[in-house]
Amino acid sequence: DQLISQIAAGEVVERPSAVVKELLENALDAGSTQITVRLEEGGVKRIAITDNGRGIAPEQLPLALARHATSKIASLDDLENVNTLGFRGEALASIASVAAVTLTSRTADAPHAWEITGSHLATVTPSSGAHGTTIDVRDLYFNTPARRKFLKSEQTEFGHCADVVRRIALARPDVSFSLSHNGKTVDHWMVGEMAKRSAQILGDNFASARLSIDENAGPLRIHGYAGLPTASKARADGQFFYVNGRFVRDKVLMHAVRAAYEDVLHGDRFPSYVLALDLDPALVDVNVHPSKIEVRFRDSRAVHQFVFHAVQRALAQTSA
Ligand code: ADP
Ligand code: MG
């Protein structure tokens, strides 16, 4: 069972940034408005995430670390209509099989916090701390040296972790985030408007040369900003697309946006954008891969057309 867990863990948490992603999604699913991420040595030595969400009751703490235990899906019907970021009940069990995990939590009505260390078999003991949850992940892959060997340098792993935090923070300006590495604060974003959060993350150039998009058609809505070429940073990672709140890198969507830019601006430089597509969860399958970066639309042609025309119309304002 331990071996199976470790193999499954390789799929779910292939590197520190994947752990950070799973833990941030859990914090958001718990309704948190304030999230702190502390990393040491690229996340390999330590990933500690504290949130102010609804917390986990002491009798639920072992379940949280058990495999295939999720509090988010009660029936197969729910699976058609996932509106939480997590639903597999796999992440914490996987992480606990390849790292030393302490989970500390306090619900709104609890007089104090409780904690559990190691696995779902361990005993829950009283602890201290504010309302919300802290998960402390140490020594990632200490017991799977083969996997540890695949990790890159500390700076590279940290860079991947920081990318994950930025992607998630960009989608949730209603939540404050802070990120530190080896004791130094790297990023800190207060609760605010999307306009401000996107300027903080994509830079002032983006803030001064972007077009707003907000369009509906039937079950589809797209909103966000399309940057003009002058807004691009000299980096290739200014493209952010979200589907129902999840960051995705989807061929259909990327193609639609690129085609709209080419159609209107004919430029060879590919500008920055932050776009969010919201649709009925029954019309999209996010269950493609554990890392959930790709999605499958029930009608990808309709989605492509909708996105293409929305971006095209926004950009056309500039040449009008
Ligand atoms: P999933 O997110 O797919 O349900 P996880 O393994 O990520 O599975 O988490 C297991 C369970 O632990 C969740 O369903 C949730 O009940 C609980 N949990 C995990 N992290 C938190 C958190 N930060 N706040 C509240 N509950 C949490
Ligand atoms: Mg989860």
Image (tube, helix red, strand yellow):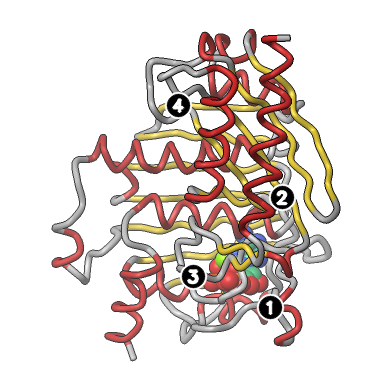
State the residue at coordinates (79%, 33%). Answer: 214
What amino acid is labelled 2 in the image?
A: Ser
Q: Is residue 241 above or below residue 90?
A: above
**Quarter of the picture holding the N terminus:** bottom left
| Label 4 sits on residue | 186
The answer to which quarter of the image holds residue 275 is top right
Q: Mark 2 vs mark 1: which is more N-terminal?
A: 2
What amino acid is labelled 3 in the image?
A: Leu
- Marks 3 and 4, Cα distance to the nearest angstrom? 26 Å
- Marks 1 and 4, Cα distance to the nearest angstrom? 37 Å
For disc 1, the neighbor class at 10 Å (few under 14, some 14 to 19, many from 20) is some
253 on left or right of 122: right
Q: Is residue 183 above or below residue 39?
A: above
| Label 1 sits on residue | 79
Residue 35 shows in the view:
yes
Q: Nearer the viewer, residue 320 or 251?
A: 320
